[in-house]
Amino acid sequence: MTQVKNNQVVLRNYVTGFPKESDMNIVESVITLKLPQGSNDVLLKNLYLSCDPYMRALMSNMEDLEGFQTYTPGSPLTGYGVSKVLESEHQDYKKGDLVWGITKWEEFSFIPSSLIHFKIEHTDVPLSYYTGILVSLNTGMPGMTAYAGFFELGSPKKGENVFVSAASGAVGQLVGQFAKLAGCYVVGSAGSKEKVDLLKNKLGFDEAFNYKEESDLNTTLKSYFPEGIDIYFENVGGKTLDAVLTNMRVHGRIPVCGMISQYNLTQPEGVTNLANLILKQVCMEGFMVTAFYHLYPKFLEFILPHIREGKVVYVEDIAEGLENGPAALVGLYSGRNFGKQVVVVAHD
Ligand code: NAP
């Protein structure tokens, strides 16, 4: 039986505050590449791993995570990824299939077939897209998150004013492009000059600004939206949300996708301008992409032609090698990533 080395990214201990690379170890283990007889697992070779902000919550010693299991210190991280089937006794998956689902942060994994969400059928688009624009089934699934949050909760109308925070990221870059497809005026905020250039020159945003350089976000927003904001796609929370609230228009919508500025704080910041929701009759609604599973076929029908025709582009930040996974993951919380953060374990 073949035994091979199997590098893993293992959580050292539960994390408080901002996660660091040193919160994870690269551990060299070995694995026998053979399924035990009668096993319900599928033996996978992992190719692409997705880095997602929600993974921070799983590094905490928390109980109330709405059904999500926190990571176990000493064990590999888990997350979404693209993998190749090496061996399977499950009728839906055979050797050589490419699959999408929950896997472990290691080179080879035994994964229960129930955690594999689907076999990848469309292989004429980059496989790494399945970690970002093309996936559907749970938190951290940027394409479907942008689609559901913007179209279902945002209910955009032609000519409306849209603001997106964390706009160059995995979700935000798509929200901006969807807003343009819907005929809206869209402004994005991001954390560096390079990201602002990307938004304006490659992703088609009408305007963009570096929020780190703005001392008064309220005034900044007023200058970009003299008539107010109809849709704010919320990714960051904190001071940005507070400034947005005073700049919303009557009957505006705020799909609350994420609040990454708050995830690593031991004491979350307060929000002081909520009374605007009443006066302006704004609908602010949190959502989990998990509630929108049923829209995936509709989403694919919408997005695949746009990708193939180059009408929607997707910017990825590819970290080569599992050993670079910890840096890639913690980089999400300081804005080190430039687009969707992916870790390549192997190319095939
Ligand atoms: P991402 O934008 O690719 O990466 C995170 C980005 O957040 C960083 O690049 C950084 O960009 C920005 N950021 C980090 N710390 C910040 C801070 N203190 N203040 C402002 N910006 C900060 O990640 P993503 O996957 O697209 O996720 C975006 C948001 O959507 C997150 O809040 C995530 O939790 C949420 N999400 C929710 C769902 C759902 O089902 N509700 C699903 C997927 C994602 P800058 O350089 O611009 O600061």
Image: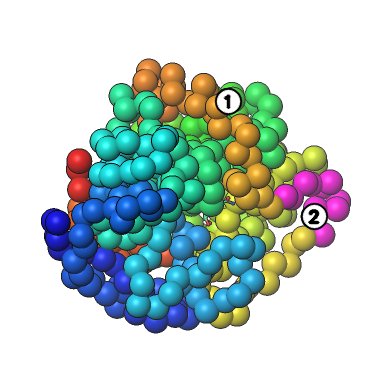
- In the rendered image, residue 231, in percent from the top left (x then y), is placed at 66, 41
Q: Residues within 10 Å of mark 1 (few under 14, many from 20)?
A: few
Front residue of 252 and 77:
77
Q: Three-letter amino acid code at disc 1?
A: Lys
- In the rendered image, residue 156, in percent from the top left (x then y), is placed at 67, 31
Residue under numbered circle 2: 276
Query: Picture quarter containing residue 11?
Result: bottom left
Quarter in which the C terminus is drawn: top left
Residue displayed at 61% across by 75% down: 63
**Is 50 placed above or below 250 here?**
below
The answer to whether one can see residue 26 in this image is yes
Residue displayed at 27% across by 37% down: 95
Residue displayed at 68% across by 72% down: 270
The residue stretch that appears in magenta: 275-285
- In the rendered image, residue 60, in percent from the top left (x then y), is placed at 50, 75
Q: Three-letter amino acid code at disc 2?
A: Asn
Disc on the earlier residue, 1 or 2: 2
Residue under numbered circle 1: 298
Query: Picture quarter containing residue 229?
Result: top right
**Is 18 placed above or below 205 here?**
below
**Is 333 placed above or below 16 here?**
above
Residue displayed at 31% across by 56% down: 36
Front residue of 191 and 71:
71
Task: Tell me the mark number nearer the camera, choosing from 1 and 2.
Answer: 1
The answer to whether one can see residue 196 in this image is no
Distance in Å between CA atoms under marks 1 and 2: 34 Å
- In the rendered image, residue 19, in percent from the top left (x then y), is placed at 40, 74
Looking at the rendered structure, the secondary structure element under dot 1 is helix
- Label 1 within 8 A of ligand 1 by Cβ: no
Q: Is residue 1 left or right of residue 212?
A: left
